Amino acid sequence: MKKFLSIILSLTMIFSLSSTAFAVEAGNNYDHISSSQAQPFNPYSSPDSYIEYLESFDGAYSVFLSQFKALTLEKQQKVLDVLENGGPLDVKLSATTVNDFPQTRSSTSQRSVNYDADFQLFGITFVTIRLEGRFTHSGSIVKSVEYKNAYIVKNWVPLSGFERTSLDAYVSNRKFYASAAFTAYVGAKIGDNIIGVTPRTFYINYNCDGTGQGTGSAW
């Protein structure tokens, strides 16, 4: 009889320990599932979230931040929608900067041009892009392209992942033509999580005669 009771007690203890171990394992699995399903912080989810996100850069985007805070709630929501999902932006074009270089040959001189485009919404600039070129000329006639470049002057918001996808410059009908395109691929990065924006491409072009004065556009 004692032996029988001893066996019963042993089985009871084994069952109890097994049940406890199963409960712990189930709890760990639940925690793992809960943590894996937790949503990462999305700065585009609300204006307050985006303000919190910008403030985390210790003043790096203070100009945009102050302008964003001054917008109405409706306009703030529109800015976030454009940042996350794409949409039309306004463009403010700068006056062309023209610089002359020392004459290289008796009848040919070099001239450079710089041309900026600010991509904006509600008067707030998101990114500034510059197109540069240098050419030889004789009076108002462009002879040849000597240099071309295009780059991001400043990101006024944390839009990373910019890549220049095209750059071209040539002479046609005695004029200088230049164009470039940039594509933004990555939005906000929160820890190891990337909250992507819809990839969008920015275009800029300019053409002028040998004086350096001409017309351009961006979109």
Image: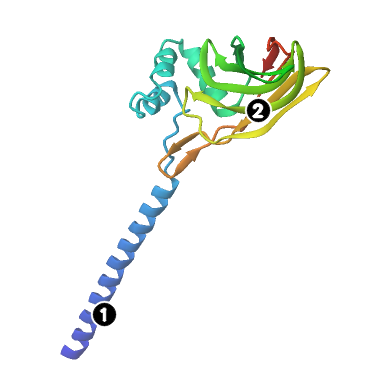
Q: Residue 40 in the image: x percent, y percent?
A: 43, 39
Image height of 205 relative to 84, above or below:
above
- The residue that disc 2 covers is 148
Element on which disc 1 rests: helix
**Callout in the foreground (2, 1):** 2
Q: Residue 206 in the image: x percent, y percent?
A: 70, 17
Q: Amino acid at mark 1?
A: Leu
In front of the other: 115 or 87: 115
In front of the other: 94 or 80: 94
Q: Is residue 143 visible?
A: yes
Q: Is residue 1 visible?
A: no
Q: Dividing the picture into quarters, in which one does residue 217 lie?
A: top right
Quadrant where the C terminus sits is: top right
Task: Please tell me which residue is depicted at 55% across the width and 28% down the height of the picture.
Answer: 84
Disc with the residue nearer the chain's start (2 vs 1)? 1
Element on which disc 2 rests: strand
Q: Dividing the picture into quarters, in which one does residue 56 lie?
A: top left
- The residue that disc 1 covers is 11
Q: Residue 62 in the image: x percent, y percent?
A: 38, 19
Q: Residues within 10 Å of mark 2 (few under 14, many from 20)?
A: some
Q: Amino acid at mark 2?
A: Lys
Task: Please tell me which residue is depicted at 47% across the width and 24% down the height of the picture.
Answer: 157
Q: CA distance from mark 2 to mark 1?
A: 84 Å
The residue at the far right in this view is 173
Q: Residues within 10 Å of mark 1 (few under 14, many from 20)?
A: few
Image height of 211 relative to 5, above or below:
above
Display coloring? rainbow
Task: Please tell me which residue is depicted at 16% across the width and 89% down the height of the picture.
Answer: 2
- Total marks shown come to 2
The residue at the far front in this view is 106
In front of the other: 36 or 3: 36
Q: Residue 64 in the image: x percent, y percent?
A: 44, 18
